[in-house]
Amino acid sequence: MTKRKLDVTIGNVSEVYDGAGGILWEMLMGEQIHVGAEAETDVLARKAGITAETHLLDVCSALGGPARYLAKNYGCRVTGLDATRRMDEEANRRTAEAGLLGKIDYVLGNALDMPFPAATFDVAWGQDAWCYITDKQRLIEECARVLKPGGVLAFTDWLEAGPMTDEEWRALNAFMVFPYMETLDGYAALAEAAGLTVVEKEDLSPDFAAHVQGYLDMVRNDFRQAIIDNYGQEMYDAVEEGITLWRDASAAGKVGRGRLVARK
């Protein structure tokens, strides 16, 4: 079945993260810019079997928060891949400040056409970012290509989790600038089709709803005035409306989050 998609390009996503969107999500989530911050990174690292010998590819590495955390706490080598120039520049700056440039390389590039040879990495990794990718099948195929034999695909993502109206689908994706969301079963099928063996898939949706409520509370209580002062009342209203929409949809089981681990 052909996936319905919004007309969202990599350029649209880069515009968001080059501007106010990247700042807003860092305010709400911290520099890791994913649900659960360091605790979730630890869970995924354990499941992926990260050690000091691991060469890990962080696909959509953003500000490099997870890359720095992994390099510092697990001793692994990390290559970050991201398509947004501001994120790439800021990741390099923060990594240099942390004294970790010797352990981490950042590459400005497209996850659908990765600038790496086949069989380069031990782990292909992502955290709550692949919802922005316009072709999930191609993404998973590229991850599989650059993994070494025996390598691990390990990621979390925001998901379509239940039935919704066309209007809800459009509004939820448009607010986040997602072209579309995959389902957990859909990701598992894509991994298998790319020649990987799914080791674990876990629905994290109940926990996700609680996190979205937390983001809404922060917008309303902690950051309301800062958003208005810096970006105006109209921006604040749009942010509150959009996150409220996501809060309601996650509470109703229409959107969620999941974790998948597969081996080549």
Image: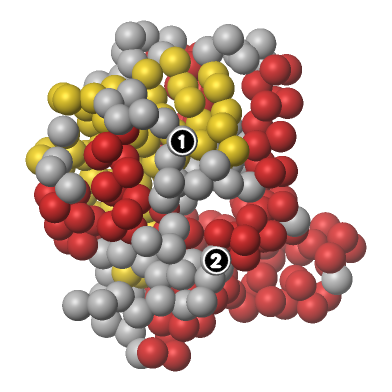
Binning the other alpha carbons within 10 Å of mark 1 as few (below 14), some (14 to 19) or many (20 upward) gives few
Which amino acid type is shown beneath numbered disc 2? Answer: Thr
Percent across and percent down for residue 245 are 51, 77
Residue ID for mark 1: 115
Task: Tell me the quarter of the image containing the N terminus.
Answer: bottom left
**Which mark is on residue 9?**
2
Which of these two is toward me, 245 or 217?
Answer: 245
Q: Residue at x 27, y 26 (%)?
A: 119
**Which mark is on residue 144?**
none
Q: Looking at the picture, does residue 161 appear above or below residue 145?
A: below
Binning the other alpha carbons within 10 Å of mark 2 as few (below 14), some (14 to 19) or many (20 upward) gives some
Q: Looking at the picture, does residue 39 appear above or below residue 139?
A: above
Q: Quadrant of residue 12?
A: bottom right
Q: Residue at x 32, y 44 (%)?
A: 142
Q: Residue at x 85, y 71 (%)?
A: 232
Colour scheme in use: secondary structure
Percent across and percent down for residue 257 are 34, 57
How many callouts does the rendering have? Answer: 2
Q: Nearer the viewer, mark 1 or mark 2?
A: 1
Which of these two is toward me, 252 or 191?
Answer: 191
Spatial CA distance of label 1 from label 2 is 19 Å
Q: Looking at the picture, does residue 102 appear above or below residue 173?
A: above
Q: Looking at the picture, does residue 122 appear above or below residue 136?
A: above
Which of these two is toward me, 34 or 222?
Answer: 34
Viewer can see residue 76: yes
Viewer can see residue 45: no
Q: Is residue 204 left or right of residue 10?
A: left
Circles 1 and 2: CB atoms closer than 8 Å: no
Which amino acid type is shown beneath numbered disc 1? Answer: Pro
